[in-house]
Image: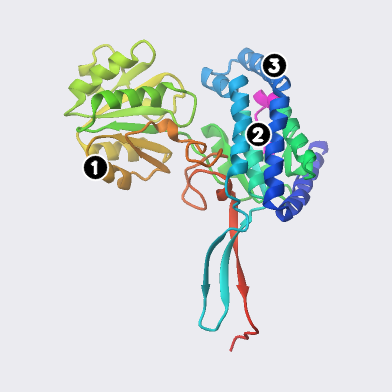
Amino acid sequence: MTRETDMLALGRTAKTASAQLRLAGGESRNAALHAMASEIRKAERAILEANARDMTAAANKGLSPAMLDRLKLDIARIAAIADGLDAIAQLPDPVGAVEKTWTRPNGLHFSQVRVPIGVIGMIYESRPNVTADAGGLCVKSGNACVLRGGSESVGSNKAIHAALQAGLRAQGLPEGCITLVQTTDRAAVGDMLRGLNGTIDIIIPRGGKGLVTRVQEDARVPVLAHLEGLNHSYIHAEANIDQAVNIIENAKLRRTGVCGSTETVLVDATIAPEALPALFKKLNGRCELRGDAQAQKLLPGIRAATRADFATEHLAPILNIAVVDGMTAALTHISKYGSGHTDAILTESPDAAEMFLNSVDSAIVLHNASTQYADGGEFGFGAEIGIATGRLHARGPVGAQHLTTYKYQVRGTGQVRP
């Protein structure tokens, strides 16, 4: 009962803090964000030391290279965490923003106004930067949060969380605005999914397919899901091959362990005899290529790609290749294997680009750009709490403005309804 009691107390603390944060002005919340960034910079050594211990333990447990890359922090990544908090502070205040107004013939004046959701429950794996991103975005949007990171990043998360709470204290905001589940007991996840006795308003999972599936199946509160990134880059018949190959190099190899990494390249059959050798020359030795039968004919010696490959988020230097007979075949492949995350077309044809952008039903669709732009910071959101792949409430990178809902304010002059 100790764990359950502690978790319920955590929920009550967050709920109380959310009420105070809701009333805090935008200037106060922004000052806290800047203070949090400053405390992250001050705590650089402590964070690095904690992360080094996490990395050693994770390597001994046999975590995959992709997971280790997500877990790893260095000076540059810590600086990026702090800079991200400062960037969030510079964003427009979503709380109190008036979406629209109108006046009815009876003189009643209506306003649709943005308000915080309340308490955000965040369950995530590996990425310790999510502790700061989620905490910062919640503070910006007037929400408290309950954060539960993976056991592999517990030391890193605690060090970052301590810095965030120091920043909150410095500006007189309650520490409960950002609460971190301290236990590594997996039962704590179940506690959160049940809503902590009504104190959690929404759950956001960020991690592997197993985590997201469990959250979606077991949650008793609304879920804003972040699914795996089964992302595609389609080299169209009218692509600039040199440009396309450079884009795919970045889309696959910039960071293979992020959800925006391209997992499958689709190549139009008419351009494949020229495009595939160029792609092989660029990636050979740095990335394992797995191709369908047509790709294997053009690139003898590459490994055969199975249906399982096309349905797998490798998060590793492995790239699937399929040769397709035109746009319709490309769209069919994406519809069959894609996860609705991020897909791109590489082409010089405006008509083909528009058709792809309008036809692919993914949260993010790009033309002549790397799928690694699937990132809230690149969208100008300062940071992201995840990439939502559903169709309700929010979709794509979830920033501060997406962590609000709305209410209607109605102003009258004595009207009564007949």
Can you say which quadrant of the picture contains the N terminus? top right
Which secondary structure type mostly characterizes the magenta part of the structure?
helix
Q: Nearer the viewer, residue 329 or 272?
A: 272
- Residue 332, by quadrant, is top left
> Please, what is the three-letter code of the amino acid marked with disc 1?
Pro
Q: Nearer the viewer, residue 178 or 298?
A: 178
> Helix, strand or loop at disc 2?
helix
- Residue 212, by quadrant, is top right
Q: Earlier in the sequence, mark 1 or mark 3?
A: 3
User: Residue 152's x, y, as percent?
Assistant: 65, 23
> Please, what is the three-letter code of the amino acid marked with disc 2?
Thr
Tag of residue 131: 2
- At 58% from the left and 46% from the top, the residue drawn is 400
Can you say which quadrant of the picture contains the C terminus? bottom right
Colouring? rainbow
- Local packing at callout 2 (Cα closer than 10 Å; few below 14, some 14-19, many 20+) is many
> Helix, strand or loop at disc 3?
helix
- At 48% from the left and 31% from the top, the residue drawn is 259
Residue 313 part of the magenta-drawn span: no
Tag of residue 53: 3
User: Residue 242's x, y, as percent?
Assistant: 26, 23
User: Residue 289's x, y, as percent?
Assistant: 34, 18
Mark pair 3, 2: CA separation = 17 Å
In the image, the segment drawn in magenta is 147-157
> Please, what is the three-letter code of the amino acid marked with disc 3?
Arg
**Does residue 181 appear in the picture of this structure?**
yes
Tag of residue 290: none
- Residue placed under numbered mark 1 in the picture: 350
Mark pair 1, 3: CA separation = 51 Å
Q: Is residue 244 left or right of residue 229?
A: left
